[in-house]
Amino acid sequence: MESSAASYRIEDVPSSGAEPLARLARQTKLENFDDPFELAPFREYVEQTHAMSVVARELADPEQEVRWVLEGDEPVGYSQLDNAEIKDNVAPPVAGSGLHLHRLYVLASHQRRGLGRALFEDAIRVAKVLDRQFMWPCAWDENPDAIDFYSHLGMERFGEHAFTIGDHEYRDFLFFLGLR
């Protein structure tokens, strides 16, 4: 019988969790975004942005909220919230302060078990505790699962921005969820 979200727990990632979180972040990013046309630059990007030193800095940053979902003692997914401004001067649908859902990833082997939703609902709880008016994640325009996930959870697409890895330009869709 497959485990349900109820057999998992969500916790703050402790500072001692930098190494397993970095490993999880690299694995989930490669599982979800591997671009066969830009494989070498993408892998380099993932290694740089998810190096243990970078993850340790993010965990120590008081502007970051990093939580993971554990199966026993093994992390199988995580979310990262920050106070980043919305990119490319795109205006949110409402005024006020938002919280950026910077990352939300679950291992491919643990997807479709309610863990992404549990992390998402946990992120909403954190945003409300911080008295934010909205939450906004991004989803790569070539990741239909993420786009469907956010849309299914009631988020509205309100903009987009471009980013470059190697010589290739990609596009993220910006999503919005009002919290009031």
Image: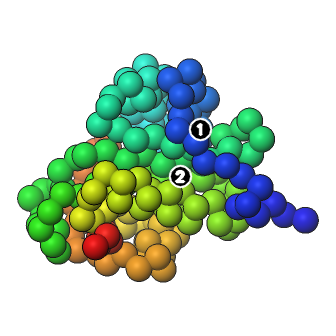
Q: Tell me if residue 94 comes above or below residue 90 in the rendering.
A: below
Q: Amino acid at mark 1?
A: Leu
Instruction: Tell whether 5 sits left or right of 64.
Output: right
The image quarter in which residue 90 lies: bottom left
Q: Amino acid at mark 2?
A: Tyr
- Give the image location of residue 54, x and y in percent: 39, 25
Q: CA distance from mark 2 to mark 1?
A: 9 Å
Instruction: Tell whether 6 sits left or right of 154.
Output: right
N-terminal label among 2 and 1: 1
Mark 1 closeness class: few <14, some 14–19, many ≥20 residues within 10 Å: many
- Give the image location of residue 15, x and y in percent: 50, 23
Question: Could you tell me if residue 31 is visible in this image?
Answer: no
Mark 2 closeness class: few <14, some 14–19, many ≥20 residues within 10 Å: many
Instruction: Tell whether 18 sits left or right of 75.
Output: left
Residue at mark 1: 24
Give the structural element (helix, strand or loop) at label 2: strand
Residue at mark 2: 105
Please report the residue visible at 51 percent of the width from the left and 43 percent of the height from the top: 67
Give the structural element (helix, strand or loop) at label 1: helix
